[in-house]
Amino acid sequence: MLTQAEASALLDRMTGVPLLWASRLYGAGIRLLECTELRVKNLDLEHREILVRDSKGRKDRWVSR
């Protein structure tokens, strides 16, 4: 497991799509499969939340930072 400083240093060296994926995985705490299935309609920009559908246990859940 990475420390917060190590994760931050790693994210600082990334760009583009890999940065987008890594920041969602780390920042929102979502799983890799959940990240691959995200859609624009699952984003609530006003409340800064992401709706993860069919999460573990086949349930929908909201995640935020």
Image: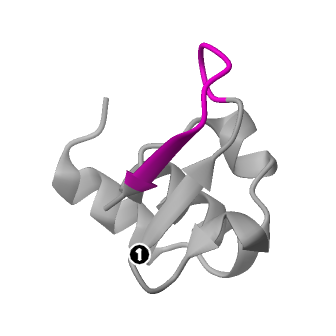
The one nearer the camera, 38 or 31, is 38
Name the spot of residue 27 as percent of width and height, x first: 38, 58
Residue for point 33% across, 54% down: 7
- The quarter holding residue 41 reads bottom right
Asked if residue 27 is positioned above or below residue 11 in the image, the reply reads above
- Secondary structure at badge 1 equals loop
Which quadrant holds the C terminus? bottom left
Q: How is the image coloured?
A: one colour
Name the spot of residue 26 as percent of width and height, x first: 42, 51
User: Taking 8 as reference, is 37 left or right?
Assistant: right
Name the spot of residue 2 as percent of width and height, x first: 29, 39
The one nearer the camera, 50 or 30, is 50
- The quarter holding residue 19 reads bottom right
Residue for point 42% across, 44% down: 29
- The quarter holding residue 38 reads bottom right
The one nearer the camera, 8 or 40, is 40
Residue for point 74% across, 35% down: 33
Residue for point 76% across, 73% down: 40
Is 62 within the magenta?
yes
The single residue placed furthest to the top in the displayed view is 57
The one nearer the camera, 42 or 14, is 42
User: Taking 60 as reference, is 6 left or right?
Assistant: left
Is 32 within the magenta?
no
Other-residue count near label 1 (Cα within 10 Å), few / some / many at <14 / 14–19 / ≥20:
few
Q: Name which residue type carries label 1.
A: Arg
Residue matched to label 1? 48
The main secondary structure of the magenta stretch is loop
Name the spot of residue 52 as percent of width and height, x first: 62, 45
Asked if residue 50 is positioned above or below residue 41 in the image, the reply reads above
Which quadrant holds the N terminus? top left
Q: Give the range drawn in magenta.
A: 55-63
Asked if residue 2 is positioned above or below residue 48 in the image, the reply reads above
